[in-house]
């Protein structure tokens, strides 16, 4: 899959439907402050993974949104059953 510059992958408090494995490019993790300012709090690059909450069977990321900072390519996996593939016990 291709990631475009400034492509939004996740919005705060919105369902996470996919996790992304990056082969190239970069993804910025941003927090929106109470006064509406975006602050970059992390960067994920080559060979990284974006969408950690779905590994732990969480459906949303409450505080941050992620968007592509640099165009790139990567693979995606649908969030449903991701915890099972990762071998994580969700405790349910």
Image (cartoon, grey):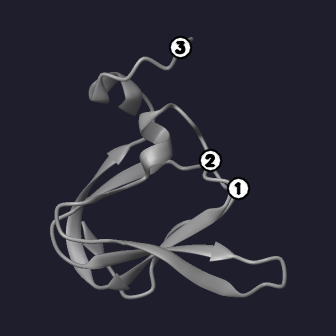
* Left/right of residue 25 with respect to residue 53 in the rendered view: left
Disc 2, SS: loop
Which residue is farthest top? 92
Under circle 3, the secondary element is loop
- Tell me what residue is drawn at x 30 percent, y 22 percent: 87
| Residues under numbered marks 2 and 1 in contact, where contact means CB atoms less than 8 Å apart | yes
Under circle 1, the secondary element is loop
Image: 76 above or below 3 = above
- At label 1, counting other C-alpha atoms closer than 10 Å, the crowd grade (few under 14, some 14-19, many 20 or more) is few
Mark number, residue 91:
3
Q: Is residue 7 above or below residue 56?
A: below
* Rendered location of residue 40, percent (x, y): 53, 81
Quarter of the image that includes the C terminus? top right
Q: Quadrant of residue 58?
A: top right
Q: Which residue is mark 1?
A: 13
Q: Earlier in the sequence, mark 1 or mark 3?
A: 1
Q: In the orientation shown, which residue stands out farthest toward the front? A: 41
* Residue drawn at 32 percent across, 45 percent down: 77
Where residue 39 appears, x then y in whole percent? 60, 83
Q: Nearer the viewer, residue 37 or 10?
A: 37
Q: Which mark is residue 38?
A: none
Residue 7's image quarter? bottom left
Picture disc at residue 60:
2
> Measuring 47% from the left and 33% from the top, which residue is drawn there?
56
Residue 82 picture location, percent across and down: 37, 32
Q: What residue occupies the far right of the structure in this picture?
A: 35
Mark closer to the chain start, 2 or 1: 1
């Amino acid at each position: 899959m291709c990631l475009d510059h400034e492509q939004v992958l996740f919005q705060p408090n919105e369902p996470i439907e996919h996790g992304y494995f990056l082969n190239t490019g970069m993804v910025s993790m941003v927090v929106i402050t109470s006064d509406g300012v975006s602050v970059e709090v992390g960067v994920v690059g080559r060979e990284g993974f974006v969408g950690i909450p779905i590994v732990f069977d969480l459906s949303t990321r409450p505080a941050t949104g992620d968007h592509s900072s640099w165009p790139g390519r990567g693979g995606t996996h649908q969030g449903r059953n991701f915890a099972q593939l990762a071998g994580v016990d969700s405790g349910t």
